[in-house]
Amino acid sequence: MNTQTPIETRLEAFRERWSGKVGKMLIGGEWREAQSGETFSTEDPATGEKLADVASGGQADVDAAVAAARAAFEGPWSKVKPDERARLINKLADLIEANGEELALTETLDVGRPIQFSRMADVGGAIGQLRYQAGWATKIQGETNEISAPGEWLSYVLREPVGVVGQIVPWNFPLAMAAAKLGPALAAGCTVVLKPAEQTPLSTIRLGELALEAGIPEGVVNVVTGYGRTAGAMLASHMDVDKIAFTGSTQTGRAIIEASKTNFKRISLELGGKSPTFIFADADLKKAIPAAAMGIFFNAGQVCAAGSRLFVAEEVADQVLEGIAGMAKMLRVGHTLDPETIIGPLVSEQQLDRVTGYIESGRQEGATVLVGGGRKEGPGWFVEPTVLVDTEANMKVRREEIFGPVLCAHRFTDADDADRLARMGNETEFGLAASIWTRDISMAHKLARRLKAGSIRINGSGGVDPALPLGGYKSSGWGRENGKAGIDAYTELKAVSVALD
Ligand code: NAI
Ligand code: MG
């Protein structure tokens, strides 16, 4: 299948694969239903149509998956050389590429993402991640250290894989995030139990199939599907899991910290955000306006690093807000299989209720709806791209992560006071990302230094790059994914000292 294959044929193949079937779990190289026999269903958020039933993993399944991962870690996987691990990760990337159109369709239907973005963000993102991470497998280094103890010593530090890793992925970019977690874990020599979100399990099941097809040994990659409060929580508290890598809400991040206390497992957390975009009067508005609009409307705002707060200089505020409002009206909101669609639905009715609830709370607290403001009628969980103006720092919509296409705008004066602007930017509990648009390079760098945010873009936009550390200050998380920090997060250090006398 490729982009030339008629959509009907592709849909037919998708239904053939999933309809009336039970999506199974990958445990020790075998596909199994839940030992309890329980299942849950996953839907297409654009229509509400059920796509498939999926195994609902419980304690027995989590135990079996962890045992399989442990056996592979202590056994065959520990003998696989770094260059072979790199080859296997690259092979998985090749298989994702070869099956790209099918995977894009799967994401579009299961997540509710416009097809053009499933190709780019999910399939393209997953391939890019795996190829980047594969390179690390052969570049993991320890060190030698001179110590001061009497006598002659050889001291060195080994960098070892951390062990069995539980990876808990959210529903907004299931395939790309699963790949971003799997890649460094495998490169470092870990084994994995991957748990996709209950809203979007299908592409992770396919990823498990492709991992086996790539020749990754049994038990190295396990997939447990199920609810967060059951399968996810069981993984997080499991005594034989050495590390949890989690992306999702700050609230669930806290639950994972609690659960990890059982055995002091290592944790990396990539959590929510409330990221600011600053547009100064001297900015290139032709670029800044569409970037600010897409920074919040892309993926219907369901992006951890979404630019959800806009601080715009008074001098250009009318022009910028009109421009963004114009885009909000123009961007095609619609069915995700329509190649022209830019904005799809939210992932679930629950998210729809959350987001419309926030818009309502904004109204009640005195914000003005400049454009949008509610649900788009009809089937599916669509929300209109929305801009709230006259928002103040103490409003709920300015403090909490909405995770929908809702921009909260605020005008600023005193554009030369970097300290004050940074205080505005830093006024939430989060610290994930920020964007700055100005031609004043001193101001751009001064503000970048002062903002408490893990990723900052100046005069440009774009998605995650696997070469750059990704993560947050404050309540946006612990640790970093990607880059060198991302691979190090899957390792333990061991200091070895040999007395030579
Ligand atoms: P969530 O954080 O509860 O879900 C994310 C993942 O965690 C899913 O795989 C889920 O099954 C799992 N999970 C849930 N509870 C768990 C527990 N106690 N132990 C272990 N795993 C658990 O997010 P949810 O409820 O789907 O969405 C709520 C809000 O979270 C969103 O409105 C958004 O604000 C935020 N969120 C942020 C994301 C990000 O990319 N930073 C992604 C998804 C949600
Ligand atoms: Mg779904």
Image (spheres, rainbow, N blue to C red):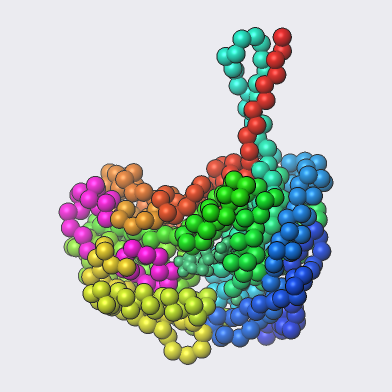
Which quarter of the rendered picture does the C terminus lie within? top right
* Image-quadrant location for residue 494: top right
- Residue 31 spot, x, y in % from top left: 79, 67
Left or right of 246 on screen, residue 434:
left
Q: Residue at x 59, y 17 (%)?
A: 147
Judging depth in this view, the residue of 364 and 321 nearest the camera is 364
Identify the residue at the far front of this view. Answer: 262
Q: How many marks?
A: 0
How far across and how far down the image is residue 400, in percent?
37, 65
- Please state, as top left, top right, bottom left or bottom right, where the N terminus lies in the image: bottom right
Classify 342 as above or below 232: below
> Within the magenta stretch, is there residue 413?
yes
Q: Residue furthest bottom?
A: 378
Foreground: 383 or 120? 383
Question: Does residue 349 appear left or right of residue 157 in this picture?
Answer: left
Residue 493 placed where, x, y %?
A: 63, 34
Q: Is residue 269 left or right of residue 391?
A: right
Whether residue 396 is visible to the viewer of this picture, yes or no, is yes
**Which one is nearer the viewer's eye here, 181 or 344?**
181
Position above or below: 489 against 318: above
Q: Name the residue: 42% across, 59% down.
A: 273
State the image coordinates of residue 366 (x, y, percent, origin top left): 23, 74
Q: Nearer the viewer, residue 367 or 207?
A: 367
Magenta stretch bounds = 397-425
User: In terms of image quadrants, where is residue 139?
Assistant: top right
What residue is drawn where x is 69% and y is 72%?
56
Verify whether residue 403 appears in magenta: yes
Q: Residue at x 27, y 47 (%)?
A: 443
Residue 179 shows in this picture: no
Vertical order, 110 against 412 (above or below): below
